[in-house]
Image (cartoon, rainbow, N blue to C red):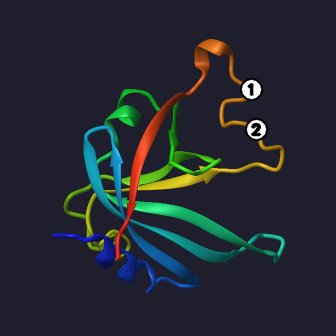
Amino acid sequence: MTTPSTIADWLRTLPDVQEASPLTIKIGRTVYPAASYHQWRTAPDGGVYVHEAIYLVGPLPAAYKRSRRVALTLPGEAAEWYVGGYFQESNPQPQHAPYHPFGPNVLLMPWRVPSGEAIDAHEWPEKKYRRVPVGIERVG
């Protein structure tokens, strides 16, 4: 069984990951083992930026399967989060296995823009994102 600590330990093995914290995340009725992390990356212009994400192990959240117009809200967080990527194969092909050692996973990323606008600030009212609350528990 994959634990939040196992995920955080694996993330720490990736290049330039400076911080990884084990978490349990609940979206709807699904509870995910997870870990948040910060990874320092180089931008095309040579500058450095911090990639922030939460790595969940498991299937896509049901709310996201129904509509991709979903903003996830974490308690105590001003930023809204979105599904920034996912991998849903249970048995990854050999060339993908090193990057997905736990099988199906979802990457949540914060929506942060300099203007501070919401993720759907420029959408028509009928196209606004649905806000879905997320439960979070720090492990360890």
In the rendered image, residue 123, in percent from the top left (x then y), is placed at 69, 22
Quadrant (top left/top right/bottom left/bottom right) for the C terminus: bottom left
In the picture of the structure, the residue carrying the numbered disc 2 is 117
Mark 2 secondary-structure assignment? loop
Where 59 sits versus 20, above or below? Answer: above
* Badge 1 amino acid: His
Q: CA distance from mark 2 to mark 1?
A: 9 Å
* Residue at left offset 34%, top offset 74%: 7
Residue at horizontal 59 percent and vertical 65 percent from the top: 52
> Are the two marked residues, 2 and 1, in contact with CB atoms closer than 8 angstroms?
yes
Residue beneath disc 1:
122
Q: Earlier in the sequence, mark 2 or mark 1?
A: 2
Q: Is residue 123 left or right of residue 128?
A: right
- On the image, the x and y values in percent for residue 81 come to 55, 47
Q: Nearer the viewer, residue 44 or 133?
A: 133
The part of the image, by quadrant, that contains residue 21 is bottom left
Q: Residue furthest top?
A: 126
Indicate the amino acid at tag 2.
Glu
In the rendered view, tell whether residue 28 sits above or below residue 75.
Answer: above
Residue at x-position 47% and y-position 61%: 54
